[in-house]
Amino acid sequence: MPQQFNGEMLRLARQFRGFVQKDMAEAIGVDAAILSRAENNALVPAEHVIEKCAQYLRVPVAFFHTQFQPSGVPLSFHPMWRSKQSVTQRERDKVLAEANIRGFHLRKLLQSVSIAQDLPLPRYEPGEYGNDCREIAKMVRRAWGVPAGPLINLTNYIERSGVFVFHVDLGYVDVDGLTVRLPGTAPCIFLNKNLPADRMRFTLAHELGHLVMHQVPSAEMETEAHQFASGLLIPLDDIRPVFRSARRIDLPLLAHLKPQWRVSMQSLVFVAKDLGLLTDGQAQTIWKQFSAKKYKLREPPELDFALEPTSLGRSVINAHLKRLGYTQEELAKALVLHVDDLRELYDLEQPRGGLRIVT
């Protein structure tokens, strides 16, 4: 017996493709009110309408019969979007739809394979530690056994704690990253793969801060996550002797430290100021130099370092393709999408044809 039509999956597919309801209704020749009621599960569309929707949205018909309830706005989503006035509702919907689809895939995939979590994902309430988020970051480093100094591969530590990290193409929208926590599966952090590596690492640390400290939203949560990220990547006790051993804190020193600590030059300026190693006048001079060289928009490309690779999500995909023997077509069918979308979402190459031995 076929499963019941799920209007939420119709809405999810439409938002994933970036279409507005009115335009889609016109394109498939259906009254917009019918489409609206279908998405809200107020009616089950006729089979020919469902087929038109599937063709227009480039998904299998079975996608609309999948029993999955998409997650709403993530914990850190609203404050982040509120600060970016240029982001449209359609762009917001598209970002969240892709995150939900990937989360749905992950839930399906983890029914067949398990992942090894060899690090804890600590939980701390900022109010219990005097709202000192740098101190909480220090405790996370201690819980994970991170050596003093630069945290070389943050992605590896986070994935070892059971959190999935995905690099996704968010070039169509002004957002750095977000975290989705679907019931019954591991948290997923989505990062804009178009970011330079220093900004991506800070975004990753920021999202980790939300996972560690925030179970419910608060007015201070973005500031707290920012302080946590700085403390995690640039512990004050570790960077202080580095600054003090230098003759002065200037652009050459910041450029020298950036690839070592794998953070932006601007982050290092803020930390030096917090340590009291830069006066207001000295910091202002550096900021003027940044402005003159347009470093606030883009720091020197020659100081860029490689993006940290992700592996946990790819290992789950590979377990199905290699260990469990799925073809890409079979895996796409299991995840209720077309194989071209499977390859695009998970950076899979199309299998090459080869010689077949006939005996």
Image (spheres, rainbow, N blue to C red):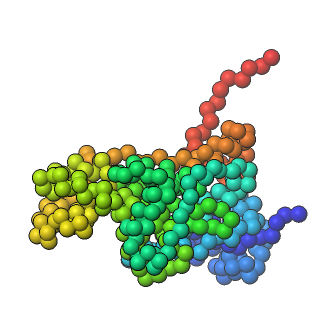
Q: Is residue 200 above or below residue 218?
A: above
The spot of residue 26 in percent (x, y) is 61, 73
Question: In the drawing, does residue 217 fall left or right of residue 227?
Answer: right
Q: Residue furthest right?
A: 1
Question: In the drawing, does residue 66 fall left or right of residue 191?
Answer: right
Question: In the drawing, does residue 233 fall left or right of residue 293?
Answer: right
Please tell me which residue is depicted at 47% across the width and 77% down the height of the picture: 128
- Count the marks: how many? 0
Q: Is residue 26 above or below residue 114?
A: below
Q: Is residue 34 visible?
A: no
- Quadrant where the N terminus is found in the figure: bottom right
- Quadrant where the C terminus is found in the figure: top right
Please tell me which residue is depicted at 18% across the width and 61% down the height of the picture: 290
Question: In the rendered image, which quarter is residue 66 located in?
Answer: bottom right
Question: In the rendered image, which quarter is residue 320 located in?
Answer: top right
Please tell me which residue is depicted at 36% across the width and 63% down the height of the picture: 231
The spot of residue 116 in percent (x, y) is 63, 49
Q: Which of 118 and 201 lies nearest the eye of the viewer?
A: 118
Q: Is residue 38 visible?
A: yes
Q: Residue furthest top?
A: 359
Q: Which of 49 and 356 lies nearest the eye of the viewer?
A: 356
